[in-house]
Amino acid sequence: MRKWNRWLSATAISAALVAATALPAMAEPPQRTVPLPLTSFSDIVVDPTLGHVFVSSRTDHAVAVTDLSGNVVTKLSNLPGATGLALSPDGGTVFVALSQYGAVAALDTLTLTERARYPVGEVCPSDLAISGNRLYFSHGCNQWDGGIGRVGFTGAEARTGLVTGHYSPQQLASSPAKPGVLVTGQPGLSPTTVQLLREEGDGLVVQASTREAGSNLRDVEFSKDGTQVHVASGAPYYVQSFTSDTLAVRGSYNTGPYPVAVSTSADSGALAAGVDDDTSVRLFPAGSLTESRSYEVRGLYPAGLAWGPGGRWVYAVGGAYTNQPPALHVLKS
């Protein structure tokens, strides 16, 4: 799911040059695996400028932070039910949905500490996505009470119920190339529903909807240019692409059984697709439906993929259903 990617700001350039030394060296093996100090996985987001990977865990109430080589830098605790992650457009903040606290936490990307906590109501916030200067969150504590809310970057004007009646919290995605639009996907139902929601006035309206996105939806993502929406569902056995205006079927990426994750590079436009199988991560160059490379990541978690800066590396979190702690796999693209 796209969590925004930011441009280098003037104030961050010097720090970015230092952080660049943490990039995986080209002489390293094409795949590196590093255990994470967590017992489960919820979400992943990459800070390309300061050079960190953030991984949340709902059951650990924590966010682990690594450098771009996968080395653990720190672990932020006391984040009750930490789930969805999103990087602010200016890169100064990683937002964390606190599903067991009714709030969104703001983590400072420079100091790697919690800066603030914004109450949003006892609605179990889940996934996050940013559109313009608004942070949207899916929410829902029980079946059929799911919805979408939003809160300002400083915690102002928190609202819930912009959209209501969802079976459970939705998977969200947004794109800087598609301002004012969210894509939502419904996990847990067969068939699933994918919708495009457009900002209108102070609310959200449905621009397009489809039930052709298969069953057991796991992840949704925009293409780099915002013209396509990619969907990973357990069935069919490929990642589907839809147009981002009407959700008409555009094409598909052949992955094999049980797609669980999809991510596109904000730099190169390449696509990474993950499946629940031995050869679980497959890479596709920008504009191509032909796989260029694949990797084995045992127990790839749903929505467990993210691209690093420059489109040179893919980060994958494995360990689901393996009785092993989550591990961060650093994959050369």
Image (cartoon, rainbow, N blue to C red):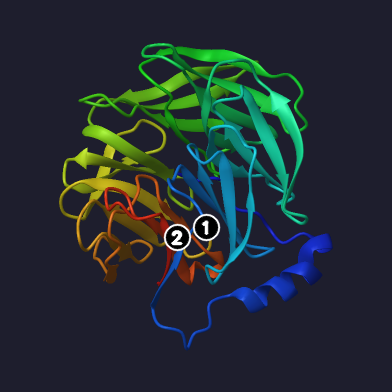
Q: Residue at x 56, y 69 (%)?
A: 71
- Cα–Cα gap, marks 2 and 1: 6 Å
Judged from the image, the secondary structure of the residue bearing numbered disc 2 is: loop
Which label number is shown at residue 269? Answer: 2
Q: Which residue lies furthest to the right in this view?
A: 11
Tell me if I can see residue 4 in this picture: no
Q: Where is residue 225 in the image (x, y as percent from the top left)?
A: 48, 51
Tell me if I can see residue 47 in this picture: yes
Q: How crowded is mark 1: few (under 14 residues within 10 Å), some or many (20 or more)?
A: many
Q: In this picture, is 266 found above or below 62?
A: below
Q: Which quarter of the image is occupied by the N terminus? A: top left
Q: Residues within 10 Å of mark 2 (few under 14, many from 20)?
A: some
Q: In this picture, is 226 found above or below 22?
A: above
Q: Which quarter of the image is occupied by the C terminus? A: bottom left
Relative placement, left or right, of 179 versus 243 is: right
Judged from the image, the secondary structure of the residue bearing numbered disc 1 is: loop
* Mark 2 and mark 1 residues within 8 Å of each other at the beta carbon: no
The amino acid on which the numbered mark 1 sits, given as a three-letter code, is Ala
Quadrant housing residue 244: top left
Residue at numbered disc 1: 266
Relative placement, left or right, of 168 versus 57 is: left
Q: In this picture, is 121 found above or below 72?
A: above
